[in-house]
Structure formats: structure tokens, C-alpha cells
Amino acid sequence: MRVEVHRAELRRLTESSAGPLVRHVEALTRLTANAAKRNVRVDDGTLRASIQPTVTVTGWRIVGRVGTSLAHGWYMERGTGVYGPRGRPIRPVRAKVLRFEARNSSVQAKGRGRIVFARQVKGVKGDRWLTRALEEVSPYRVSRPNY
């Protein structure tokens, strides 16, 4: 038995931006980004607006990524404080108390929350908005990260 590989055709399939494999990864990446934008909790919309899909082709490797450059996106995915990777409350490092704006639906409509001071806070549960987006869209098995 003899197998001949047509290298130009193989390159077109795997490396060309017009190739079907690259187009497939681009479509899945775009759909995942749209699902992530639907799933993420919104405060002022900057996180939702920062979610971007990218596809890179390096040799035989086609990688689709969906993410944000904003740090709080990762915290909303994983959780913070007792719900985060360290599993302990958030305490101030350089001061005696934490200071932040607490918002609820009635106060948020006016644009400002009330100022709160606390020695420690529990943190926020992560809601895995990005992992859920990939699970919703992907036709392939998705393994959840352990964090």
C-alpha cells in the first residue's frame, strides 16, 4: 500500500486562513465569545465589551482563545475570598479597614452606592461565565478546570 500526501492541499486545510479547519475554529471562538458576553454579570458593561475572540495559526497548530484583558474578569470566573483559590476572607493589607462602594438595584439607578467600611469581607462566588460559554457552544467534550 502506498499513501501520497498532497502537501499543498494539507497546508491549505490546516494553515490557510481560508481553510476549513481554521474557519471552524474561528466560528467556534466567535460563538463562545458571544455566549460569554451573555453569561457574564454586568455592572457597568466594561467587562462585557472587553471580551474578544482571537485565532492564531502556528504551523499545524490552530488555537482559538476567548478572554478579556481586565483582571476582574478572571476573579468573576474563579471567585474571590472564601470562594476563591485561597479560601480565606479578604482583609486589608496596608490599612485597618477595607473601603468600597456597595451597590444594590435601587441605589445603582442613581449612579452611586453607599460607602462601606469593613475589617474583612467574604468575597464573591465565581460563576464560571467563561467555562459555561465554552460548554454551551463546543460540540466537543469540555473538561472543567479545578479551581
Image (cartoon, rainbow, N blue to C red):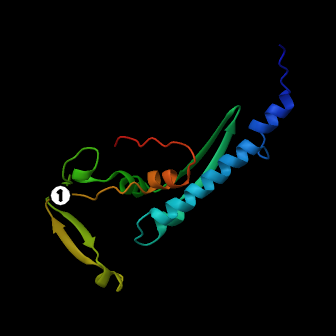
The residue beneath circle 1 is: 95
- Which element carries disc 1, helix, strand or loop? loop
User: Viewer-proximal residue, 24 or 65?
Assistant: 24
| Quadrant location of the N terminus in the rendered image | top right
Is 103 placed above or below 55 here? below
From the viewer's perspective, is residue 51 above or below residue 141? below
Q: Is residue 145 visible?
A: yes
Q: Is residue 52 visible?
A: no
Placement of the C terminus among the 4 image quadrants: top left
In the displayed structure image, the side of residue 125 where residue 34 appears, left or right = right
Residue 116 as seen in the image, left or right of residue 58: left
For the point 19% across and 48% down, which residue is it? Answer: 88
The residue drawn where x is 81% and y is 37% is: 12
Residue 114: give x, y in percent of width and height: 24, 78
Determine whether, in the image, residue 45 is placed left or right of residue 76.
Answer: right
- Could you say where residue 115 lies in the image, as x and y percent from the top left? 22, 75
State the image quarter where residue 146 is shown: top left
Which kind of residue does numbered mark 1 sit on? Answer: Ala
